[in-house]
Image: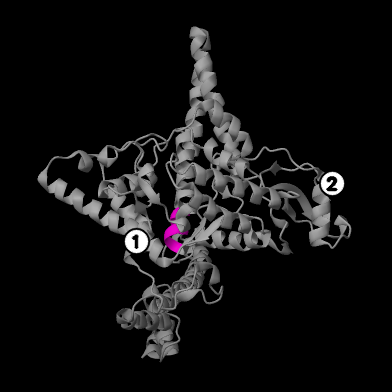
C-alpha cells in the first residue's frame, strides 16, 4: 500500500539513507509480488467486457505481468486488430488497504509532529487526495493525455518535439480499475541504475586483483562512462519535460521514481525516456506557477561566490535576493517557525532547486534529515505544492544515484524566465495545450502549420526542378529545350517562394514580393506581350548563331522587326 510508495521515495535518496537500505527498497519500484494471471483476467473481464470472454477483445493476453507495483500490475496483450498494448490492472482490495495505510500514517504524523522535520500530517493529507485520483484509472487516462500534451509544447504553448514519451490510452478501453494503453518496449531506469552499481562493484573488485585484472578494469570504466553519458542525457530529458509541465501547462506528473521511468531504444546507443503511470498529478494555478518561476530564477542567482562574498555591493544584492525570495515563498503559502529569517527561506529554496555543492545561507545543512536542516524551520508547507516538492526531490535523488551534480535552478532558468516574462492573463483567449483544436491550434500553431505547408510546397518544387538544373549544369545536349525547362522550373520556384513570403512575412516587404512574382510570370511567358517577346528572343538567338543560311537570317531579322 502506501508504505510501499514511501519506500519507493526513500530508495532514490542514496544521499540520505544507508546503501543497504536503498538497495533493498529498490525492489519496491517495479518488482513486487504480483497477483495471479487468472485474477487479473477476471478484473479485465468484469470491467471491460461485462463478464464476457476475454477473446472478444484480445487476441493474446500474457498471464505473466511485465511489472508489479503498489497499486497495479501491467500485462502485455494484443487486441483483435493486431495492436500490441499494455493492460494496467488494479490489485484487488487495494483501495481499502491504501486508505487504511494513510489513516495510520496521519495518526503517526500527528503524534510525532514535534520530532519530524516537516509537518507530515499535511503532506499525507494532500497525498490522500492524490491517491483517490490514482485509484481511478479514468482519471489517469485523462492525465496521461495532458502530460503528453504538456511535454510536447514549449512554455509559450507552441508545438515542439516531445522531451519524453508518454504512453497514451486506447480510446474507449478504460475503467476505474483497468487501463489499456500503448505498448512500449524498453528498460526500466531502476535496472540501469542497478547495472551501474554492479559495474562499480566490478571495478572495485578488479582493483583488488592486481595487474592481471587491468583489462577488466578498463572495460568496466568504459561501461561506467557509457552509463554516465546515457544517464545524463535521460536526466536532461526528464528535467526539460518537467520544465514544460511546471512553467508551461502547469500540469505536473507527481511520481517520477525510477520504476516509472523507462528507456526506449537503449540498444541503439541513443535512448529516449518514457514516463509511465500518470496516476499522481497536480494542476498548478497560474499565480503559483509564476511565483515558482520567480523562486527558481532567484535561486539561480545565489551562486557560491555571491553567498560567500564580503564585498559591500554583493552583500546588498544578496539581501535583495533574500527579500524577493521570502516574498515569493510567502505568496505560495510557505510559513516558517517563529524566529526564522529570510535566509531560512533562501536555504529551503536552495535545497529544492539549487546546486548541491553551494553552501546554504544561515549555517544550514544540505542534509535534509540532519538536525540543522532548513526543513525543520518550516511551520506549514503549502499542501498544493506537495507533489511539486516530491518531484523535485525524486529528480535530485535520481541524479545522485547516477553520480551527477544537478542544479534544477540552472536547468530551468530559461523556462522560468520565459514564464515570468510572458504572463498569462485571464482576459485573453489562452487555452491549455491539451485543449487546442488540431485544425485551429491557436495563432502560433495555425501560422506554423500554414508556413510549414507552404515551405513543403516550395521545397518540393525545388526538388522537382533539380534534374533539369543538373542537366543544364552538366552541359548535356538538350539545347533550347533544356534551357526552357530550366527557366520554367526556376520561375515556378520563384513564384512559390513569393507566395510563401507573402503568407509568412511582414506586410512592408510585399511590394518586393510582388516584383518577384511579376518577373516569374514574364519568365513563364504569362505577362502582357509574352508571345511577342519569346519570338524576338528566339529570332535574336538565330541571328547570333551564324550557322544558318543568309536568306533565313534576313527573314528572321525582318520578322523580328
Most extreme residue toward the right is 53
Horizontally, residue 491 falls left or right of residue 350, namely right
Q: Main secondary structure of the magenta part?
A: helix
Please check the rendered image and state whether residue 246 is part of the magenta-colored stretch, yes or no. Answer: yes
Say which quarter of the image contains residue 49. Answer: bottom right
Along the line of sight, the residue nearer the viewer: 122 or 277: 122
Say which quarter of the image contains residue 58. Answer: bottom right
Say which quarter of the image contains residue 271. Answer: top right
Along the line of sight, the residue nearer the viewer: 326 or 249: 326
Q: Which residue is depicted at the point 62% across and 63% down?
A: 142
Location of the N terminus (image quadrant): top right
Location of the C terminus (image quadrant): bottom left
Q: Which mark is residue 331?
A: 1
Instruction: State the SS at label 1.
Output: helix
Q: Which residue is depicted at the point 50% across and 68% down?
A: 433
Most extreme residue toward the left is 312
**Residue 96 visible:** yes
Q: Is residue 448 above or below residue 109?
A: below
Horizontal and vertical percent position of residue 210: 49, 8
Q: Is residue 282 above or below residue 523?
A: above
Q: Alpha-carbon neighbours of circle 1 within 10 Å: few (<14), some, or many (≥20)?
A: some
Q: Which residues are magenta?
A: 241-248
Horizontal and vertical percent position of residue 337: 33, 48
Amino acid at each position: 500500500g502506501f508504505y510501499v510508495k514511501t519506500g519507493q521515495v526513500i530508495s532514490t535518496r542514496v544521499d540520505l539513507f544507508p546503501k543497504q537500505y536503498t538497495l533493498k527498497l529498490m525492489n519496491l519500484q517495479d518488482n513486487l509480488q504480483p497477483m495471479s494471471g487468472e485474477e487479473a483476467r477476471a478484473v479485465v473481464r468484469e470491467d471491460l467486457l461485462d463478464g464476457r470472454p476475454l477473446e472478444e477483445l484480445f487476441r493474446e493476453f500474457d498471464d505473466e505481468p511485465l511489472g508489479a507495483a503498489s497499486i497495479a500490475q501491467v500485462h502485455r496483450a494484443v487486441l483483435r486488430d493486431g495492436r500490441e498494448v499494455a493492460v494496467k490492472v488494479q490489485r484487488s482490495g487495494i483501495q481499502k488497504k491504501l486508505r487504511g495505510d494513510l489513516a495510520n500514517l496521519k495518526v503517526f504524523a500527528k503524534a510525532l509532529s514535534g520530532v519530524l522535520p516537516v509537518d507530515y500530517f499535511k503532506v499525507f493529507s494532500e497525498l490522500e487526495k492524490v491517491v483517490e485520483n490514482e485509484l481511478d484509472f479514468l482519471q489517469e487516462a485523462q492525465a496521461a493525455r495532458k502530460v503528453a500534451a504538456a511535454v510536447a509544447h514549449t512554455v509559450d504553448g507552441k508545438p515542439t518535439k516531445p522531451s519524453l514519451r508518454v504512453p497514451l490510452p486506447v480510446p474507449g478501453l478504460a475503467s476505474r480499475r483497468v487501463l489499456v494503453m500503448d505498448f512500449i518496449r524498453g528498460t526500466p531506469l531502476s535496472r540501469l541504475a542497478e547495472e551501474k552499481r554492479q559495474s562499480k562493484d566490478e571495478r572495485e573488485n578488479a582493483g583488488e586483483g592486481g595487474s592481471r585484472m587491468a583489462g577488466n578494469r578498463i572495460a568496466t570504466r568504459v561501461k561506467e562512462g557509457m552509463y554516465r553519458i546515457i544517464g545524463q542525457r535521460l536526466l536532461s530529458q526528464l528535467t526539460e519535460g518537467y520544465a514544460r509541465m511546471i512553467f508551461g501547462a502547469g500540469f505536473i506528473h507527481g511520481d517520477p521514481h525510477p520504476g516509472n521511468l523507462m528507456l526506449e531504444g537503449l540498444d541503439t546507443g541513443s535512448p529516449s525516456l518514457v514516463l509511465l503511470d500518470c496516476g499522481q498529478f497536480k494542476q498548478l494555478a497560474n499565480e503559483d506557477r509564476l511565483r515558482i518561476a520567480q523562486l527558481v530564477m532567484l535561486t539561480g542567482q545565489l551562486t557560491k561566490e555571491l553567498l560567500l562574498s564580503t564585498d559591500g555591493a554583493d552583500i546588498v544584492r544578496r539581501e535583495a535576493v533574500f527579500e524577493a525570495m521570502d516574498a515569493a515563498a510567502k505568496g505560495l503559502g510557505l510559513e516558517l517557525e517563529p524566529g526564522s529569517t529570510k535566509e531560512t527561506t533562501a536555504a529551503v529554496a536552495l535545497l529544492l532547486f539549487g546546486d548541491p555543492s553551494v553552501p546554504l545561507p544561515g549555517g544550514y545543512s544540505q542534509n535534509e534529515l540532519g538536525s540543522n536542516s532548513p526543513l525543520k524551520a518550516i511551520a506549514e508547507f503549502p499542501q498544493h505544492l506537495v507533489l511539486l516538492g516530491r518531484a523535485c526531490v525524486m529528480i535530485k535523488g535520481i541524479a545522485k544515484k547516477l553520480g551527477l551534480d544537478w542544479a534544477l535552478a540552472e536547468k530551468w532558468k530559461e523556462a522560468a524566465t520565459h514564464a515570468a516574462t510572458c504572463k498569462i492573463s485571464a482576459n485573453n483567449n489562452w487555452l491549455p495545450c491539451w485543449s487546442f483544436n488540431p485544425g485551429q491550434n491557436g495563432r502560433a500553431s495555425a501560422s506554423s502549420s500554414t508556413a510549414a505547408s507552404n515551405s513543403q510546397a516550395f521545397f518540393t518544387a525545388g526538388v522537382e526542378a533539380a534534374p533539369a538544373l543538373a542537366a543544364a549544369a552538366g552541359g548535356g545536349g538538350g539545347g533550347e529545350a533544356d534551357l526552357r525547362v530550366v527557366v520554367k522550373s526556376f520561375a515556378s520556384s520563384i513564384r512559390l517562394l513569393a507566395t510563401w513570403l507573402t503568407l509568412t512575412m511582414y506586410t512592408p516587404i510585399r511590394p518586393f514580393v510582388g516584383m518577384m512574382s511579376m518577373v516569374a510570370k514574364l519568365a513563364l511567358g504569362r505577362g502582357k506581350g509574352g508571345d511577342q517577346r519569346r519570338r524576338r528572343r528566339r529570332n535574336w538567338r538565330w541571328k547570333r548563331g551564324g550557322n544558318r543560311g543568309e536568306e533565313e537570317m534576313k527573314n528572321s531579322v525582318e520578322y523580328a522587326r
